[in-house]
Amino acid sequence: MITPDPQTTRIWTSLLNTGQALLEGIESELKNNNLPRLGWYDVLLEIEKAGPNGIRPYELKERLLLPQYGLSRMLGRIAEAGLITREEVENDGRGQTIKLTPKGLAIREAMWPIYAEMLVNSIQDKLSKSEAAELERILRKLGAGS
Amino acid sequence: MITPDPQTTRIWTSLLNTGQALLEGIESELKNNNLPRLGWYDVLLEIEKAGPNGIRPYELKERLLLPQYGLSRMLGRIAEAGLITREEVENDGRGQTIKLTPKGLAIREAMWPIYAEMLVNSIQDKLSKSEAAELERILRKLGAGS
DNA sequence: CCAATATAGATGCAGATGCATCTACCTTGG
DNA sequence: CCAAGGTAGATGCATCTGCATCTATATTGG
């Protein structure tokens, strides 16, 4: 039977734990500042990047690799909070166009400094330049051709 | 304002994505084989390691770093599935002792080959020995003194 | 033109998680 | 001995996720 090297197991657990710990740290900082969860950040940013014409949910889904039902409900909650609007689409009766509201933009911008500071403190400051490069390279290898 | 190096952001996203992808891969393999989720594995293994005298939930909580309420409910579900028993404790009327049933042991053992194979395929085989060592070292640095 | 099929998005249901709180029991200081 | 505080574990509530399925519209092959 195939048995992984103990090192492999250690890598696996610390990969998962490290990611989780960082995530929880960021989430908790956001919550302390009465800001939405990190998941919203990516969505808001992606909508913002799409520009004033807005973006269709299915495009968001593809770009962010979110499951369709998850995105659908998240957009519902984000819209509920007044951070986006959902408009009907001209030539496709099934679809909708998502646009950022000023409030949505403001919230996204308010999240960034907190997010950024956590990234710097928890990752950047802990690694040398060469370690960072090495880590990036190895993670890319792990992700590739899964 | 503090702004992370783009490299830092890339590391963060691929750290999270890689971990998520591996996790989903393993979970999905387990599900394909009608086996429980990975979360149960750790719990079952820890109970198994505790030996025939069983283990108290609060010890499990400490060893696995699970939130108390999460563990409590998870033990409920695992017991429901007949994989563990919960007995009263002699000298502590508040507590209970968790023991693995034969079925619990069997399930844990059935999960391992699948888990193991995924670890080998998704991590071990993708990295050279030195990359693995380097990754382990760097992850440890990231986790330390958070 | 239209039946079959595909696509966009929503939703009912079950399971899981976080948070706060609750109950029951135990320990300790006066 | 007992009141106050601590510890073990459970649970109500809201939120979130996965899965399957549903509705509505669009596209396509005959």
Image (cartoon, coloured by chain):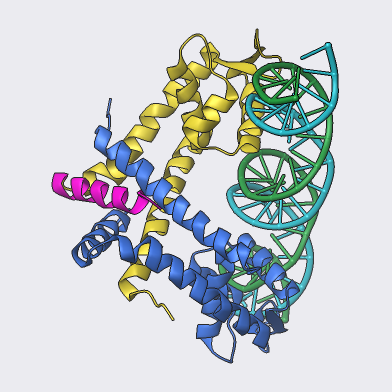
Chain colours: A blue, B yellow, C green, D cyan
Residue A11: percent from the left, percent from the top? 30, 43
Tell me what residue is drawn at x 65 percent, y 9 percent: B91
Judge whether residue A136 can be spotted in this image.
yes
Q: Is residue C23 left or right of residue A7?
A: right
Magenta range = B129-146
Residue A7 is a magenta residue? no
Q: Nearer the viewer, residue A11 or C25?
A: C25
Residue B141 is a magenta residue? yes
Quadrant of res B118? top left
Quadrant of res A43? bottom right
Tell me what residue is drawn at x 22 percent, y 67 percent: A129
Task: Check the image and name the residue furthest to the bottom.
Answer: A52
- What secondary structure predominates along the stretch shown in magenta? helix
Q: Is residue D11 left or right of residue A69?
A: right
Q: Nearer the viewer, residue A68 or B94?
A: B94
Q: Nearer the viewer, residue A105 or A54?
A: A105
Judge whether residue A101 can be spotted in this image.
no
Tell me what residue is drawn at x 26 percent, y 59 percent: A135
Tell me what residue is drawn at x 27 percent, y 29 percent: A2
Q: Nearer the viewer, residue B103 or A13?
A: A13
Residue A67: percent from the left, percent from the top? 56, 60
Q: Is residue A144 above or below residue B82?
A: below
Residue A16: percent from the left, percent from the top? 41, 47
Residue B125: percent from the left, percent from the top? 22, 44
Q: Quadrant of the N terminus of chain B?
A: bottom left
Q: Is residue B85 left or right of residue A143?
A: right
Q: Is residue B45 above or below residue A4?
A: above
